[in-house]
Image (cartoon, helix red, strand yellow):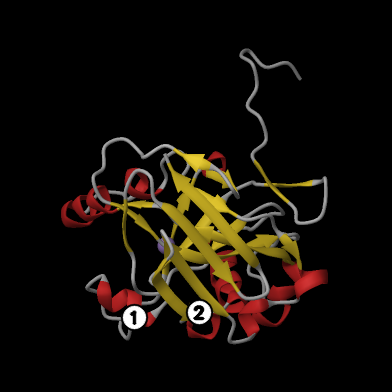
Amino acid sequence: MKYAISSVEQASIDIDGSKELFPVRRIYCVGRNYRAHAIEMGADPDREAPFFFMKPADAIVQNGSTIPYPTQTSNLHHEIELVVAMGKGGASISKENALDHVWGYGVGIDLTRRDIQNKAKESGRPWDMGKGFDNSAPCTAIRPVSDIGHPDTGKGAIWIKVNGEIRQESTLDLHIWNTAETINYLSSLCELQPGDLIYMGTPDGVAAVVSGDIMEGHIDGVGDLIITIA
Ligand code: MN
């Protein structure tokens, strides 16, 4: 096969303790998967099921990176999230078998141009430019299930500091939909494939970052993420 233009590189993310890379196929994100965050965004967590949106695979950013402050926003928000890395694909995967499809986990930030997203919400337009922009998906090296098990089955801490100050702090058991339930529902909408990532949704406390800020994210048993805004 010969392409008419120079072909696109496979997006990938590091694997903890390995020289191999985890290829990134699609990045799915869960919306409003923590009650307290749904409430802070003006939604009713009891009436609304979580929903999905996407980021392009090449929005992925390696741990330790410095990224530019994005264009066309003056309200860039951090959302600290557990990232699920799929090792096996499938359609309509049962809850019982869902975790067998997971290869590993990472610590991610769903960076959001909140001003663009809010305008899109008001006008009923798509969220893509608020969520799926360049460098919008930082993530740590993936740690395999064989090393760490399934963090979402426990009460591990998830937090993010900006310039050393805690902004978001919660636990993984407070996901409205856990990893198995999310894979079950998402795979009923789209056939999942190896290399898909799922950003699992953020707790409350989302807030703005500006140029020069240093974001440090942590999830117990999964890792530590550090990203600087240039
Ligand atoms: Mn999010």
- Above or below residue 42? Residue 59 is above
Split into 4 quadrants, where in the image is the C terminus?
top left
For ligand 1, give the image quadrant: bottom left
Q: Residues within 10 Å of mark 2 (few under 14, many from 20)?
A: some
First in sequence: mark 2 vs mark 1: 1
The residue where tag 1 is placed is: 36
Would residue 33 be seen by someone viewing this image from the given angle? no
Split into 4 quadrants, where in the image is the N terminus?
top right
Tag 2's secondary structure?
loop
Q: Nearer the viewer, mark 2 or mark 1?
A: 1
Q: Quadrant of residue 157?
A: bottom right
Q: Residues within 10 Å of mark 1 (few under 14, many from 20)?
A: some
Query: Is 136 on the left or on the right of 123, as rendered?
Result: right
Query: Is 54 on the left or on the right of 120, as rendered?
Result: right
- Above or below residue 109? Residue 175 is below
Toward the front, the furthest residue is: 164
Front-most of residues 17 and 102: 17
The residue where tag 2 is placed is: 177
